[in-house]
Every structure is written in structure tokens, then in C-alpha cells.
Image (cartoon, rainbow, N blue to C red):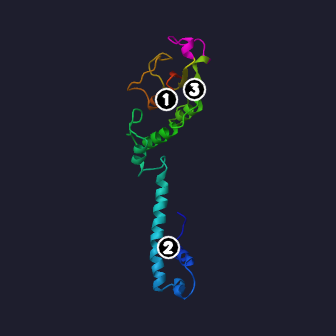
Amino acid sequence: MTGRTVEDHTQALADYLPGGRGFEAKNINDSEFRKLLRGVSHELFNAQGYLAELEGQYFPDKTEDFISEWERALKIPDDCFPGTGSLTERRRDITVKLASLGVQTAADYVRLGGLYGIPLTVSPLSDENPLPPGVSVVDARYMTVITGPVLVGNFPPYEVPFFLSAGETVLQCLFKKLDPANCGLLYRNA
């Protein structure tokens, strides 16, 4: 809040009114007209408080009251985001989903991982030699390697092709949705 009191609002209203005989009571403290201005100012004071409260709830990483509205606007729950969990997890999912709307580069994938606290590296498969089993030189041009901790559990370094299952993370689900249709993703544990 700006720290303005009801009396500050009352004086501000009085200052906006014209001078002259019709409005001379605007500055007389116990006049009926000043009491009217004070009553209106009380509502302005309340509105200021409501706006300050709304401002604190507007952003998805801070909201409690509007969490459901944010989820509904972003169509959560979906395949990747369950729409359940603690308030902190739900806020994070909203932030991640918003951030994923503009993903275009390898750095964007790295930033999404960072929102989950997972350090990632993203590189084209063609930079690697030798290629993993089952991947031809032609296919390698269209594959991206995402390296990070706990991305693949109980599998060899590469899992080709990558299919979603119940045990995979929200992040991997999101990456699969964001990956261009002509490309493939390979995950490797760091």
C-alpha cells in the first residue's frame, strides 16, 4: 500500500473540487460536506487495500487465491501437469507451463530444467562419436541429447526411442511435447 490514510484521500477529493461559495465547506472539518467526502474516501481507502491485496495475488509464483484460475487458463491438468500437489508445486507447474510457451532454443530447455532445479545440457547427437546403438548417421542429424541427473532410471546411457511411461518426470513429458515433430530426444544421466 502507498501509506495514504482516509484523511489523505479526503483532502485529495477536496482538492479536486472547485473553490467558491458552493464548495467552501469542503475544508471545514466538522461540516456535513466534509463528512460526505470522508465517507467516500473511506471506500477509496478500502479499494486501495483490495488493489494491494490483488497485486500480491496476481503473479503465478505468489498467488494463493488465483491458483485455480491460472491452472484453468493454462489447461492444467494435462498429460504432463497433474494439477495436484502442494501450493508450491502447483505454482512451479504454472510457471513452467508459462515458460514452455516460448521454448525455441537449447538454452530454453536448460532454463526449464533450472525451474525444477535440474542442471541440463542440450546438444545435437551429431556432435557425438560413436553413435548410440540403433541410431543411424542420417537419424543422428535430427536427434537432440539432453543430459542431466536422474533423467533415465535403470536404463543404458541412451533409451532409443524414448516412450513416456508412468515413471518419467513432468519435465521429460514437457520436453517430448516441445520437441519438433521431425526430431527425437535422447536422455542421458549426467
Q: Where's residue 94, x and y in %?
A: 46, 42
Tag 1: amino acid: Phe
Q: Residues within 10 Å of mark 2 (few under 14, many from 20)?
A: some
Q: Which residue is mark 3?
A: 122
Q: Residues within 10 Å of mark 1 (few under 14, many from 20)?
A: some
Q: Quadrant of residue 2?
A: bottom right
The reply to whether the C-beta atoms of the residues labelled 2 and 3 are less than 8 Å apart is: no
Q: Residues within 10 Å of mark 3 (few under 14, many from 20)?
A: some
Q: CA distance from mark 1 to mark 3?
A: 11 Å
Q: Which residues are magenta?
A: 127-140
For residue 6, the mark is 2
User: SS for tag 1?
Assistant: helix
> Sequence-wise, which precedes: disc 1 or disc 3?
3
Tag 2: amino acid: Val
As rendered, which of 101 and 43 lies closer to the eye?
101
Please give left or right for residue 7 compared with residue 76 in the image.
Answer: right
User: SS for tag 3?
Assistant: strand
Q: Main secondary structure of the magenta part?
A: loop
Q: What's the residue at 51%, 84% (across, down)?
A: 29
Q: Which residue is mark 1?
A: 175
Q: Where's residue 40, x and y in %?
A: 46, 74
Tag 3: amino acid: Val
In this orientation, does residue 190 appear? no
Q: Where's residue 143, x and y in %?
A: 54, 20
Q: Where's residue 156, x and y in %?
A: 48, 15
User: Does the magenta run of residues contain 166?
Assistant: no
User: SS for tag 2?
Assistant: helix
